[in-house]
Amino acid sequence: MCTWLSQQVEASGAARGVADWMRVTAVNVMYDHPVSAPYDHALLLDFINPSQGVGARVGIELSASSARELVRAIEVALASTEAKADLVQQSNH
Amino acid sequence: MKDALIAEFVGFAGHRSDVIEGYLARPISDTPVPSMVLVHHAPGLDPWCKEVVRRFATEGYACLAPHLYHRRGPGNWADVAAAGRAEGLAKSMPNDQVMGDIAGAAAYLRAQPGSNGKVGVIGFCSGGRQTFLAACEVPELDAAVDCWGGSILPQPESEGRPASRGVLHRAGDMSMPLLGIFGNDDSNPDRAEVDEIDRVLTELGKDHTFHRYDGAGHAFFVTDKPVYRLEQALDGWQQVFRFLDRTLKGAD
């Protein structure tokens, strides 16, 4: 069923996108100097597909507090009935 | 003619003659000019680093910044840098490769028709450490400026970061004057580490001058981040150009 469960968190940071949908096969996570976000350090997330070259990347740089809010919202989303069921199913694969 | 310059991307022969990309700015000048190799910080050859390359040209220096993550490409510099950073420093910027790229950049600059034959190197953050090492391992350079180079001393393993041997043990081979710029609120290098670097260089009789700033931390020259410190950065740049004018232009 459609869950229609959505949340919005305020965020501060920067993002680097791609022109169209891309298949994501890995995520790099760092806490280090950002390139664009106006912070000395930031949470750096790179959603990537290395087989498609370095340009197959959606890069996100978030302030620490924004990242913490995002984690909280993700945890709420993953606490839904549908997500719990999927997590059980996917853990059996 | 101050402020007249040409800036462009060039290819040059780096480590093992690999042709890598670099960002070059040079003053439009009727007289020979000294040159600088700029070693970018860990985020890569970003807009601030390119701005500094152009700044050098306005001050009468040809300046070439090798894109040290180039081999991880091709692609936009930011994507290439992100891929390199994710693999860790040891794999993305091994010391011998970086030294080869710096030596290649110096050779490229020295071969330009407008060169006065003098070439220095400046580096920031991880590039500061690489600059310190270049002052020991790339003798064809004439002067070096280490801006807050971290991990010059050995570092223990911590928070998932591997232990590192540092580069201070190479100081005996340092063959050129070194200028150091440090913020006293920095944690890598912290005050005690800068004291130790100073002590070792002094004991070895190496020509070095350190400028250490209160009220400044890591990367305080970087204008697009909160760590920028106006007064300290202005004085720091003045010290940098005073040092380079003396070592590369022969000014008193």
Image (cartoon, rainbow, N blue to C red):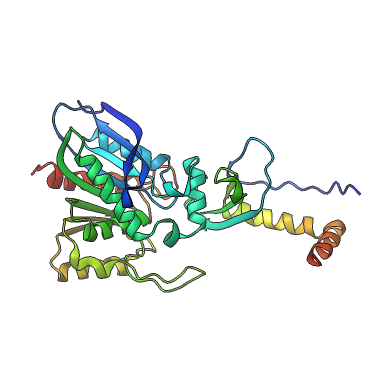
Q: Choose between B74 and B163: the one closer to the eye.
A: B74
* A68 left or right, relative to B64: right
x, y percent for residue B35: 21, 41
Up-down relation of residue B103 to residue B29 (above or below):
below
x, y percent for residue B25: 30, 34
Up-down relation of residue B127 to residue B156 (above or below):
above
Count of labels in the image: 0
Picture quadrant of residue B234: top left
- Quarter of the picture containing the N terminus of chain B is top left
x, y percent for residue A86: 83, 59
* A25 left or right, relative to B4: right
> At x 62% / y 49%, what residue is drawn?
A49
Q: Choose between B246 and B126: the one closer to the eye.
A: B126
Q: Is residue A32 in sight in this rendering?
A: no
Q: Is residue A10 in sight in this rendering?
A: yes
> At x 61% / y 40%, what residue is drawn?
A17
Residue found at the far front of this picture: B17
x, y percent for residue B79: 52, 45
Residue found at the far bottom of this picture: B156
Up-down relation of residue B157 to residue B189 (above or below):
below
- Quarter of the picture containing the C terminus of chain B is top left
* B227 left or right, relative to B109: right
Q: Choose between B66 and B72: the one closer to the eye.
A: B72
> At x 22% / y 61%, what residue is drawn?
B136
